[in-house]
Image (cartoon, rainbow, N blue to C red):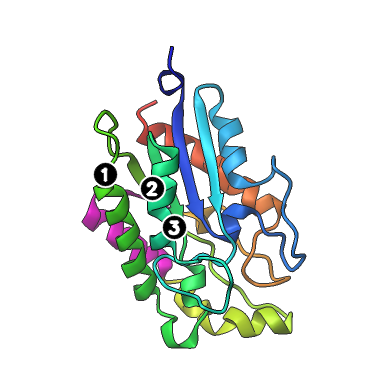
Amino acid sequence: MKDTDMNKTILAFGDSLTWGFVPNAFDRHPFDVRWPNVLTAGLGQGFRVIEEGTNGRTTAYDDLTDGSELNGARALPMVLETHQPLDLVIVMLGTNDLKFAGRCRAFDAELGMGRLIEIVQKFPYMPTYQVPKILIMAPPAICKTRDPWFSDLWEHAIAESKKLPQHYARLAKAMGVQFYDTNKVAKTDPIDGGHLDVASTRAIGKALVPVVRKILGE
């Protein structure tokens, strides 16, 4: 039996919230705490979730202040090629689109997310593989922090971050994909205003179990 017959393969494509950045610690949450792996554990046998998070990743915008490639629209095609076949692609991005004062609108994140959806839908997969289903997620809204560096990084964008759910819900409806608002179960940690503590990253993984099962018809 082929591996593809045994598993439903899910790609978790995101930024530091998917990578597991510990609030203001410049460290990573343990493997079993990060939400993609909590989701894997909750789904059980027959499912595999691939962690693909990069700190600072945007939807479709360049960040030339960093030595890494942070433009999600550039990274996604390579990731799709590497990990095909995929049954589901989950994308949680947008917070880093709001960092720059000249581009801190939730609408810009919506446009970038739309580009990522288009990449997944139109990618030239192997001819025997189907186009994966897509779930886009609004990240938890940024909150106020007393940390001066992180306050400078994104406190100007708190109001816009709260608009991401309405923008992504609209986009999902227009492009025929699924949407989930992680603000229902998680919140950012005021230690740095934008990352997740253990409870919140676990909560996202647990909440997604029935969502993913429904999307995949399980």
Q: Report the label total.
A: 3
Mark 2 vs mark 3, CA separation in Å: 18 Å
> Which mark is on residue 135?
2
Residue identified by numbered label 1: 124
Q: Which tag, 2 or 3, sits closer to the chain's start?
A: 3
Q: Secondary structure at mark 3?
A: helix
**Of the residues tagged 2 and 1, which is closer to the observer?**
1
Q: Which tag, 2 or 1, sits closer to the chain's start?
A: 1
Q: Neighbour class for label 1 at 10 Å: few (<14), some, many (≥20)?
A: few
Tell whether 57 sits left or right of 193: left
Mark 2 vs mark 1, CA separation in Å: 19 Å
Residue identified by numbered label 3: 75
Mark 2 and mark 1 in contact? Answer it, CB < 8 Å.
no
Q: Secondary structure at mark 1?
A: loop
State the residue at coordinates (47%, 61%): 93
- Quadrant location of the C terminus in the rendered image: top left
In this view, the residue farthest toward the bottom is 102
Amino acid type, callout 3: Ala
Over which residues does the magenta segment extend?
164-180
State the residue at coordinates (24%, 32%): 127
State the residue at coordinates (40%, 61%): 74
Amino acid type, callout 1: Pro
In this view, the residue farthest toward the top is 1
Q: Main secondary structure of the magenta part?
A: helix
Nearer the observer, 198 or 50: 50
Q: Which tag, 1 or 3, sits closer to the chain's start?
A: 3
Mark 1 vs mark 3, CA separation in Å: 15 Å
Q: Secondary structure at mark 2?
A: strand
